[in-house]
Image: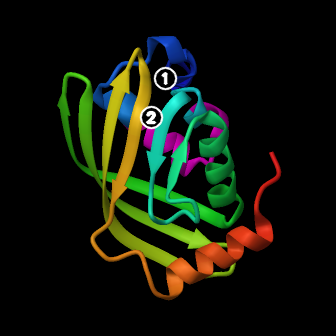
Amino acid sequence: MRFLSEKIMMANNYELNRENIELLFESFSNKDIEKVMSVFDNDSIFIDAHYPEKEMIGAHSIRRGLSWSINNMSSMKFTILNLWISEDKASVEVFAQHKLKIGLKLDFKEVFIIEIKNQKIKRFEAFLPYPPFGFVNFASKLIWKIFKPKI
């Protein structure tokens, strides 16, 4: 496992393949911001309606969003169900199992589109099987205002 951990940290050698995608989601699950951030740069776009800022552009914005997410989760787990890779793009269907620090358990499917450019993730976008509004969206925005990470 040590080799894989070192591999993802070598951001300028990041390739879009099954091994690296599995490691990326493992790094999310382990709440390892440094490993996750090693594959993003200032031109990257991270889009996920679960976050108070749905569209995060650039490393600083993405780090702030990930910090918010990690700081509000007691556990995160992504199980890859399906994976399709085509040159510089991939789609990843996952089953997410998260637990918020307030005790709420969240289990849902989600699809991510990943695009790379110059050996970095250019676009990382989540697609949800439900609309991102209602109480969960309201609660995430409220939590963001109260506990916004100061980076």
Task: Identify residue for label 1.
Answer: 4
Q: Residues within 10 Å of mark 1 (few under 14, many from 20)?
A: few
Whether 93 is among the magenta residues is no
Task: Identify residue for label 2.
Answer: 23
**Furthest-top residue in this view:** 13
Q: Which residues are magenta?
A: 22-35
Marks 2 & 1, CB-CB < 8 Å contact: yes
Q: Position of residue 78 (x, y in %)?
A: 42, 55
Q: Amino acid at mark 2?
A: Leu
Q: Position of residue 2 (x, y in %)?
A: 56, 22
Spatial CA distance of label 2 from label 1 is: 7 Å
Q: Residue at x 68, y 48 (%)?
A: 64
Whether 28 is among the magenta residues is yes
**Residue 111, label in figure:** none
Pointer 2 or 1: first along the chain: 1
- The answer to which of 60 and 126 lies nearer the viewer is 60
Compared with residue 134, is residue 27 higher up or lower down, i.e. above or below?
Answer: above
Q: Amino acid at mark 1?
A: Leu
Q: Residue at x 45, y 64 (%)?
A: 49
Compared with residue 79, is residue 9 higher up or lower down, i.e. above or below?
Answer: above
Q: Is residue 35 left or right of residue 142?
A: left
Q: Position of residue 149 (x, y in %)?
A: 78, 56
